[in-house]
Image (tube, rainbow, N blue to C red):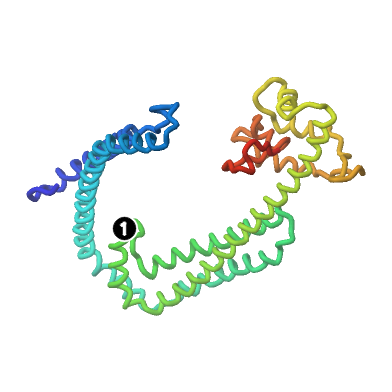
Amino acid sequence: IRGKRTEEAELTPLCQKAEEAVVVAQSSVDAARSDVQPPAVEDVSPDLKDPDLRRDIEAFLAEEYKVPQVRLGQLEKRIKRVTNIVSKYRKDLRTARNKVLFASMKDELVEKVKATGEDTGAIEGVDPLISAAEKGVEPLFKRLRSSVPEMRALAEQAAAAIDTAMDSFQTTSFEVMPIDPALDDDLRRKLRDVAAPHARQPLLLLGQRQRRLRRCVNLLETFRCEVSKKRRNEFSKVQASLLRLFRHRLGESGADAETLFVSLANGGATISKAQFLSFIRSLDKVVRKEGSQETEEVHLPEAEVEALFDAQANGAGLLDQARFRQLASPRLRVARATPLTSGLAIA
């Protein structure tokens, strides 16, 4: 690649081989690097207590492993050099191709743009669709108190209106500036620059319409985030109610979550939705209030329970033991031990 000028048909396969060799070489270096890390002193001498001797051994191990680590660093530099050479060749090749394409396409593009001229009729035809998209997103944030299904239905309606407007906008944009979107980004930018002076007004109007569409897209994305947040809050409430019922049942039976799962699964590894819902229906809904001897009935809509099951289930729509335990007996995990948490069980 770096030698005398050679035909592209010969160099392109060579680049492909070089890139494949780089992947193999980098994998080998990564594997070797994990093998040349100094072992821990505990692995070398488990019974070592002397701190001074420990420091001496650590320094000795670090020095012994320094040479192979430096060698691996040198190999990585060579791999990076090959990668840079191949990347530069591909970039130069792309630049040369773009130069030829630009020379052959610019005159035809300019003629097409001049033929369209300053006609803005096609752009004005997009306005009703963009207005429909804006009307679709306008009521979204007025309906934040609606149910999640209603909010999702509104979002789908707004998304459909935006997609229709976006398709029409892209078609009109191509009519104003007929540049193939499959071309290289740099080539498309150069072609647009040379043709833009002949379509100033249409491009200005397209920019205005594009900003309106982008605002609709951003509003819809924000609304969908609010829907997801509301759904998570609903799930947390349903899960808290389920947990109260599970604890009441486990407290009465004296069993644990694992035993309950085995019973529901009939010895299997998973629980189906029908089995889970049937079990929830059988639970006593009257439980003791938190921190009180009084009792109350837990209201648990089956549709919400079913939605929670769907969210927790695996790809096959089944609940395994780990996921069931999260519903029936969730546990907190100590991320890092401290003097206050060592030996502390958190349930």
Q: From this view, report whether residue 174 is shown above or below residue 31.
A: below
Relative depth, front residue between 341 and 86:
341
Relative depth, front residue between 85 and 148:
85
Quickly name the residue at label 1.
183
Q: Quadrant of residue 24?
A: top left
Relative depth, front residue between 272 and 346:
346
The reply to whether residue 24 is in sight is no
Q: From this view, report whether residue 290 is shown above or below residue 161.
A: above
Residue 314 coordinates in the image, percent (x, y): 61, 35
Picture mark count:
1
> How many residues crowd around disc 1 within 10 Å: few (fewer than 14), some, or many (20 or more)?
few
The reply to whether residue 113 is in sight is yes
Give the residue displayed 21% in from the left and 53% down from the top.
Answer: 88
Mark 1 residue type: Leu
Residue 97 coordinates in the image, percent (x, y): 21, 57
Identify the image quadrant of the C terminus: top right
